[in-house]
Image (cartoon, rainbow, N blue to C red):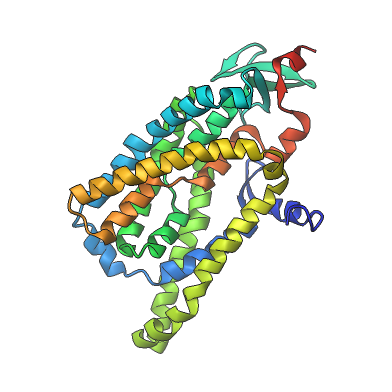
Amino acid sequence: MAELPPGVAHKLDSMAFFVNRMPIVSIPIAIRLFFMMYPIMVKIDFASVVKTRKSSKPVLLTLFLSWCIKPFSMYGIAIIFLGFLFRELIGAEAMDIVKMPFGLDLPMGATHGAGTVILQIGIKALQLPLWRSYFAGCILLGIAPCTAMFLVWGYLARGNDGLTLVIVAINLFTMLLLYGILSGFLLGVGSLPVRQALLLSVAIYVALPLAVGYISLKLIIAAKGETWFKEEFLHLLIPITIISLLTTLVLLFSFKGDVILANLPTILWIAVLLFIKTILIFGLGYWLAKLFNLTYEDSAPTALIGASNHFEGAIATSVMLVGFCKHTRNSFRHSTAEDLNH
């Protein structure tokens, strides 16, 4: 899709909700995610959500995995692989030049995290080792648990839907408090100003389908009855979640198809360390859940969310910090230290 229909992918990619003139939430992706989330939200038994509050073990275990283990394991794995094992493959002396983070104004020669402020084409920019750029992306991606997509994984794993919704709600609140602070700490740049972007993505990706699902559940049962709702309506929705999930992934890849094709080795290196982190956290989470005698229905969502990544938050944060990728790369290219001297 990125290569064959000229301009279609880029046109769709440009349709977004903006925060501070930065595209934060893709409208096509938001539409697909709504149809992916609605069938799950409309079938949630809110009585089970109330009952879930009586069992604190899965929630506490999820918080422990998501905020005490996962961010620091992501940091350690990224340092080992990108800073040492894959550094020569990336280019030990390779440098990256990116736009100054949104709202940041530092003098020439000042340092910000691992970067140094330089003047590039008459514009202040940050020069930093290329592997540190990839490292920052891994931290932003892996530091927080998934929200919208996680509801799909819990549904597909036949987990406890009520518990899944409670875990998502608690993690959303925790994310608003800790994501900016913890990611800024691990990147060495202080707290990141990302609450606006997170609130917008949460409202569109989670709150909207949840509200529509709850309202339509009440209206449909009042009009047609609970039997018709369970035996007829829910069966009509079964293929919608899977189709929407697949088309969402296709859109995500097509929007950056040119970037993917131009950076396949880099994507492979980063996929290796993300895969290792995911398997490690999932295995630890599922083992701990069984150690605490949790049922499969509670163990599955607990382990899955601990191993998940919040891609929406990572994209929104990256865009707010350094601008939209396809715009910055036209001006600032990857280069070596020797190229910069010339």
Q: Position of residue 258 (x, y in %)?
A: 73, 45
Seen at 39% across and 38% down, the residue is 177
Q: Quadrant of residue 249?
A: bottom right
Q: Is residue 13 visible?
A: yes
Taking the image as shown, residue 185 lies to the left or right of residue 121, namely left
Q: Position of residue 275 (x, y in %)?
A: 46, 42
Q: Residue 320 or 295: which is nearer the viewer?
A: 295
Q: Quadrant of the N terminus?
A: bottom right
How many numbered marks appear? 0
Depicted 59 relative to depicted 320: above or below: below
Seen at 44% across and 64% down, the residue is 210
Q: Quadrant of the C terminus?
A: top right
Q: Residue 101 or 36: which is nearer the viewer?
A: 36
Depicted 208 relative to depicted 217: above or below: above
Q: Is residue 194 visible?
A: no
Seen at 28% across and 61% down, the residue is 297
Taking the image as shown, residue 81 lies to the left or right of residue 296, namely right
Q: Position of residue 43 (x, y in %)?
A: 39, 72
Q: Position of residue 218 (x, y in %)?
A: 39, 77
Taking the image as shown, residue 299 lies to the left or right of residue 212, namely left
Seen at 48% across and 36% down, the residue is 273
